[in-house]
């Protein structure tokens, strides 16, 4: 099946710092999403980004589908940004589609 | 309404109990999903329903029984679970086709099997 690799696995930042999270995937995909999972388990959709660049406040994402990677940028990080960031790709299977997750990047932002 | 609602939020059950997890969405999505997430791991797909029909079963043990009574509801019936089944169970929904078929997740049911 498709492989989704995220790096780094862990990241510790000081409040106000910037960071880049990377997602590589092994095959062509129908779509890609970035999620933030908060400490209560809620998976919050950040970006739906099969290709190109999107921005939402301090967050932005870029996907280069032809080279099979996506980047999530966090600028001026805040303690509330802490949590696990997942990249997930959509792959068609048997007429349906399945969302496959990477292992995530655990981000800790210290005050 | 852009939410997926899951109930209950927490559940403790014995190995001989029968319980059900419920999931509801009113976004008109025709695909619904159950995921299982163990601590410090990514979510893993269990079942996919497309137009109320089971389309993917990721070799899940029969003690987990999904049901999709209509296009807005998804249930997961639990029977004779094992302690290793303790996990966060996440429901999600999406459009089946279209340019914006991103997945929306519920807040999950945290299940403990004792």
Image (cartoon, rainbow, N blue to C red):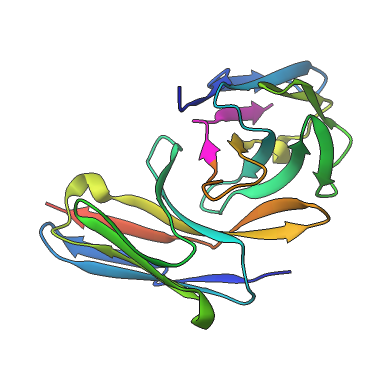
Q: Determine the residue positioned at 54% across, 26% down.
A: B27
Q: Is residue A29 left or right of residue A9?
A: right
Q: Confirm whether residue B89 shows in the render.
A: no
Q: Which residue is drawn at the image coordinates 48% and 26% (left, top)?
A: B3
Left/right of residue B65 with respect to residue B73 in the rendered view: right
Q: Is residue A103 visible?
A: yes
Q: Is residue A67 above or below residue A20?
A: below
- The spot of residue B62 in percent (x, y) is 89, 35
Number of residue marks: 0
Judge whether A48 appears above or below A30 on screen: above
Quadrant where the C terminus of chain B is found in the figure: top right
The segment highlighted magenta reads B104-114
User: Which residue appears farthest toward the bottom when viewing the image?
Assistant: A67
Look at 41% across and 34% down and name the residue there: A40
**Percent position of residue A111, x then y:** 11, 51
Residue B106 against residue A69 in the figure, above or below: above
Q: Quadrant of the N terminus of chain B?
A: top left
Q: Residue furthest right?
A: B62
Q: Is residue B110 magenta?
A: yes
């Amino acid at each position: 099946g498709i492989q989704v690799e995220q790096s780094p696995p862990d990241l510790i930042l000081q409040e106000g710092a910037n960071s880049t999270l990377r997602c590589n995937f092994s095959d062509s995909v129908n779509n890609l999403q970035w999620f933030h999972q908060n400490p209560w388990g809620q998976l919050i959709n950040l970006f739906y980004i099969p290709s190109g660049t999107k921005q939402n406040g301090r967050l932005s994402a870029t996907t280069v589908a032809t080279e099979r990677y996506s980047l999530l940028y966090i600028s001026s990080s805040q303690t509330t940004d802490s949590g696990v960031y997942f990249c997930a790709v959509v792959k068609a299977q048997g007429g349906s589609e399945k969302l496959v997750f990477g292992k995530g990047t655990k981000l800790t932002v210290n005050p | 309404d852009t939410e997926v609602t899951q109930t209950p939020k927490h559940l403790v059950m014995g190995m001989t109990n029968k319980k059900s997890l419920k999931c509801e969405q009113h976004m008109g999505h025709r695909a619904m999903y159950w995921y299982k997430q163990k601590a410090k791991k990514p979510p893993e797909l269990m079942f996919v329903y497309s137009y109320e029909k089971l389309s993917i079963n990721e070799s899940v043990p029969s003690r987990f029984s999904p049901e999709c009574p209509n296009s807005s509801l998804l249930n997961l019936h639990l029977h004779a679970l094992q302690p290793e089944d303790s996990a966060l169970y996440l429901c999600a929904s999406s459009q089946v086709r279209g340019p914006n078929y991103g997945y929306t997740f519920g807040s999950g049911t945290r299940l403990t099997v004792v």
